[in-house]
Image (spheres, helix red, strand yellow):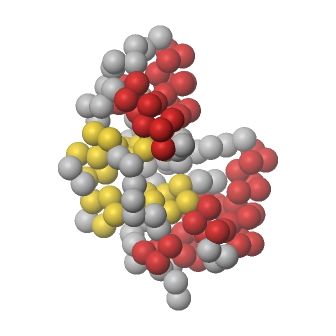
Amino acid sequence: MRKIADIMSTDCVTLSRSASITEAARLMRDHDIGFIPVVDGRKLVGVVTDRDLVVRGYADNRSGSESLDEVLTSGVRTVPSDMSVDEAASIMAAEQIRRLPVVNDGHLEGIVSIGDLAVREIFVNEAGEALSEISEHGNSSYAH
């Protein structure tokens, strides 16, 4: 049985909660990503997405110099690295989540995304179904 540790991305771009909104936006642009885990050391404290920057940041007239604390999402759904890929795919489909931070003992170990499931041809049907459902509903939820 394949585990999340076998397919997760471990080269995660992260920021601290004191980083600025503009710094997050530039990092997203430079790395062509829309999701950044926010950490205190290695401890996951939340995530910030490009949508968070727009909806809770710039659209609320926040300056780009304000900290990510103003826009990050805490209480994010996480999974342990020893969880089965099948179980993670089921969670992603059921909760319409595109990305799951992989956390062990509170420390961020990596990220698993729908793309990780599909690209590696593991549970492609379930990953495809999850992506289809998320796209149909226009829901880019990542925290519950």
Q: Is residue 35 above or below residue 63?
A: below
Is residue 78 visible to us here? no
Residue 131: give x, y in percent of width and height: 71, 57
Residue at x 40% of width, y 55% of height: 12
Residue at x 53% of width, y 55% of height: 99
10 sits to left or right of 135: left
Residue at x 70% of width, y 50% of height: 134
Residue 123, image quadrant: bottom right
Residue 45: give x, y in percent of width and height: 31, 45
Is residue 122 visible to us here? yes
Between 88 and 30, the one nearer to me in the picture: 30
65 sits to left or right of 139: left
Q: Is residue 91 above or below residue 87?
A: above
Q: Is residue 41 above or below residue 116?
A: above
Q: Residue furthest bottom?
A: 1
Between 19 and 73, the one nearer to me in the picture: 19
131 sits to left or right of 64: right
Q: Residue furthest front?
A: 30
Q: Residue furthest top?
A: 61
Residue at x 31% of width, y 51% of height: 44
Residue 23: give x, y in percent of width and height: 37, 29
Q: How many marks?
A: 0
Residue 81: give x, y in percent of width and height: 40, 72
Residue 119, image quadrant: bottom right
